[in-house]
Image: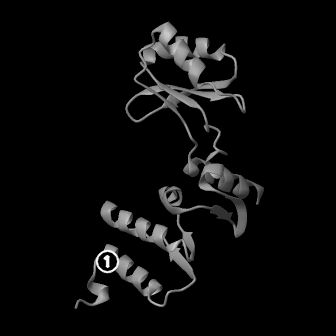
Amino acid sequence: EQPIDTLSKGFKRRVGLAQALLHDPRVLVLDEPTDGLDPNQKHEVRNLIAELKSDKAIIISTHLLEEVEAVCSRAVIIAHGRIVADGTPAELAALDPQHKAVILVMPQSQIAAARAKLGGLAGIAAVDDWVGEEADGLAIRPVAGTEILTSIGTLVRAEGWDVSEIRLERGRLDQVFRQITQKVSIDA
């Protein structure tokens, strides 16, 4: 019994979604559907989108790339009014130069020695500094099509490095978005 303009931003979003669904459209266009929602509300909206996608075409316009990864089966990047990339979120993430890089988080005192040893491994394209929020380390990029995680793990154990984290990067959509749209801006 409350006027819509007196609702919180999150409830206004939910009312807008209900209005869009009221007439059971075949195509649903959503602009930033989870903007302003708390984590529980985001989860509910994502579940609703997952349920609806079996019998509706759903187009989501968003700058929230976590949203793309969470609910989209296809992503299109548009810059200066042109489509500059089109694929699944995983295909686009694979365009990130750090895709399939191995990240080693380790003490600063061991980084130089590790860089030298890692640079000598087969299948390594580059060993770059990696800066994290709480610790630093190295990002080791493979030669295309090469699996390097096992050989790096073997070297870490053999050298006894004090590695607090080792992980395989899957690529980041935000990095790909910046890379593609900045190139379009330069080319335009």
Mark 1 Cα shell of 10 Å, populated few (<14), some (14-19), many (≥20): some
Q: Is residue 134 above or below residue 112?
A: below
**Quadrant housing residue 118:** top right
Residue at figure coordinates x 70%, y 22% from the top left? 123
Q: Amino acid at mark 1?
A: Phe
Where is residue 15 drawn, in percent x and y? 36, 82
Furthest toward the right, the residue is 187
In this rendered view, identify the residue nearer to me: 33 or 88: 88
In this rendered view, identify the residue nearer to me: 137 or 104: 104
Using residue 46 as the reference point, say whether residue 28 is left or right of it.
right
For the N terminus, the image quarter is bottom left
**Quadrant housing residue 83:** bottom right
Furthest toward the front, the residue is 54
Furthest toward the left, the residue is 1
Residue at figure coordinates x 54%, y 79% from the top left? 28
**Quadrant housing residue 141:** top right
Where is residue 126 drawn, in percent x and y? 66, 25
Using residue 157 as the reference point, say whether residue 8 is left or right of it.
left
Name the residue carrying label 1: 11
For the C terminus, the image quarter is bottom right
Residue at figure coordinates x 60%, y 54% from the top left? 89
What is the number of callouts on the image?
1
In this rendered view, identify the residue nearer to me: 24 or 84: 24
Residue at figure coordinates x 53%, y 60% from the top left? 68
Q: Is residue 183 above or below residue 75?
A: above
In this rendered view, identify the residue nearer to me: 41 or 115: 41
Q: Is residue 16 above or below residue 167?
A: below
Where is residue 55 drawn, in percent x and y? 55, 76
How was this image coloured? one colour
Q: Secondary structure at mark 1?
A: helix
Where is residue 86 drawn, in percent x and y? 69, 60
